Amino acid sequence: MDTVDLAIVGGGVIGALVAREAVAAFPDVTVAVLERGLIGQGASSRSAGVHFPRGATARVRSMSEHSQHVWERLAAELDLPIREVDATVVTSGDADALSATYLRLGDETAPADPARGWEAPPGARAWTLPGCHYADVQGVAGRVLAGVRDRVTVLEGTEVTELSSDGAYHRLTLGQGRELLARRVVLAPGPWLAHPAWADLVAPLGLRVKKVVATHVESSPAPDDPLTIFDDEDAFLLPLHGRGHFLFSYTSDRWDVAPDDAGLVLEPSDLDDARAVLGRFAPGLVARCDSGRVFCDAYSPSREPVVAELRPGLVFAGAANGSGYRLAPAIAAETVAALDLTPTRTLSQPRQRQS
Ligand SMILES: Cc1cc2nc3c(=O)[nH]c(=O)nc-3n(C[C@H](O)[C@H](O)[C@H](O)COP(=O)(O)OP(=O)(O)OC[C@H]3O[C@@H](n4cnc5c(N)ncnc54)[C@H](O)[C@@H]3O)c2cc1C
């Protein structure tokens, strides 16, 4: 039976960053990432991948700040598929109200651009928001792991079907019938919270899975078109330059879906809801809002990401409430800090260092 110091279940953007953070902090630990599909194929593959420096609580603001620094550093180091974008926040409130959640507001700007058919509801104001970017999140997860693949065993097409704990180690049964012993385990299953291998363990966290919808708007973005965040609506309009269209993300209120539901598709009511919000700001785009992407994400009761030890040496990481890309570096840092990865040599043999 194979043994590792750390098994990471789930190869989404959070699992990938936990792997990177673990080998950076503890270069001698043995790490395996177990992914039932391909790396980044879960919620990460459907993500809009927007980062904006925002947080409703002090912890999330601090996580957002930390994550922004890490993404900027990794983007340069690993040539990640990340694109900086100008951004504007539109609100019916004032700068003080926005400053309570956004880390760094820029100058006040026009809330509408009549030349492009943009209108703004009466009383709307807008500010620029520096420090935003968007990413191909599946590509990011793959690149992050590629950078440590000589030190991390990546097993794709490998479902974890059972998970049991026995004193000093955890036993993971893998889809192919193999078993793996791990001194520590990180569960980073995205919205797959109800998998029988861990449903009972995760249940006390009170997490729920919500449908997430982003529509596609068939209008070609200009190179300098900004990301526009409609703060009152918790919605945003993002120019996807590489794909040649805009993405409009709004808040869906359909709870308790499952990631493997066949019915998790774009429904007529999703398009109606998206068009109603979009029509308040850019009526000229409503008729072009006809398709989109649908998946789901895990949400926590506190609306903060969850890093929680479920059993000694077994930590859950995720439930980032639709912000799992932008907060992933901070979630990974908290997760590795919650694991005692100090080498004990009870399971893994000391590595021969090459001089
Ligand atoms: C449409 C949409 C738009 C979004 N836009 C944004 C955005 O703009 N900004 C932002 O920050 N966030 C956004 N999000 C949220 C963000 O994408 C997610 O929070 C993030 O991708 C979650 O990453 P994860 O690694 O936790 O989960 P996932 O990417 O889902 O990874 C979990 C992995 O676990 C694997 N797995 C599950 N069960 C098993 C098992 N038994 N054995 C082995 N492997 C298993 C799955 O195959 C999956 O690959 C969006 C989400 C959606 C759906």
Image (spheres, rainbow, N blue to C red):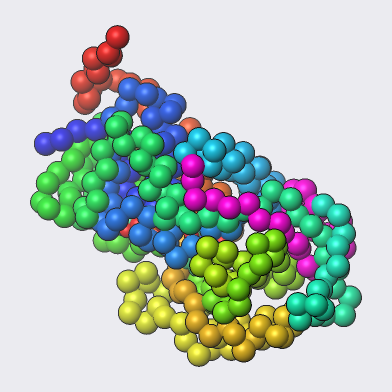
The residue at 77%/48% (across/down) is 104
Figure check: 247 above or below 290: above
Using residue 223 as the reference point, say whether residue 265 is left or right of it.
left
Q: Position of residue 296 (x, y in %)?
A: 45, 69
Q: Position of residue 21 (x, y in %)?
A: 44, 34
Figure check: 80 above or below 319: above
Q: Looking at the image, in which quadrant does ligand 1 appear? A: bottom left
Magenta region? 79-105
Q: Nearer the viewer, residue 113 or 199?
A: 113
The residue at 53%/89% (across/down) is 269
Using residue 178 as the reference point, say whether residue 224 is left or right of it.
right
Quadrant in the picture for residue 59: top right
Number of residue marks: 0
**Residue 188 appears in the rendering:** no
The residue at 53%/58% (across/down) is 49
**Residue 154 appears in the rendering:** yes
Quadrant in the picture for residue 114: bottom right
Single out the residue that lies furthest toward the top. Answer: 355
Q: Position of residue 186 (x, y in %)?
A: 36, 43
Q: Position of residue 80 (x, y in %)?
A: 49, 46
Q: Determine if the magenta segment contains residue 102.
A: yes
Using residue 293 as the reference point, say whether residue 38 is left or right of it.
left
Figure check: 229 above or below 204: below
Quarter the N terminus occupies: top left
Q: Determine if the magenta segment contains residue 234.
A: no
The residue at 23%/46% (across/down) is 155
Q: Nearer the viewer, residue 321 or 237?
A: 237
Quarter the C terminus occupies: top left
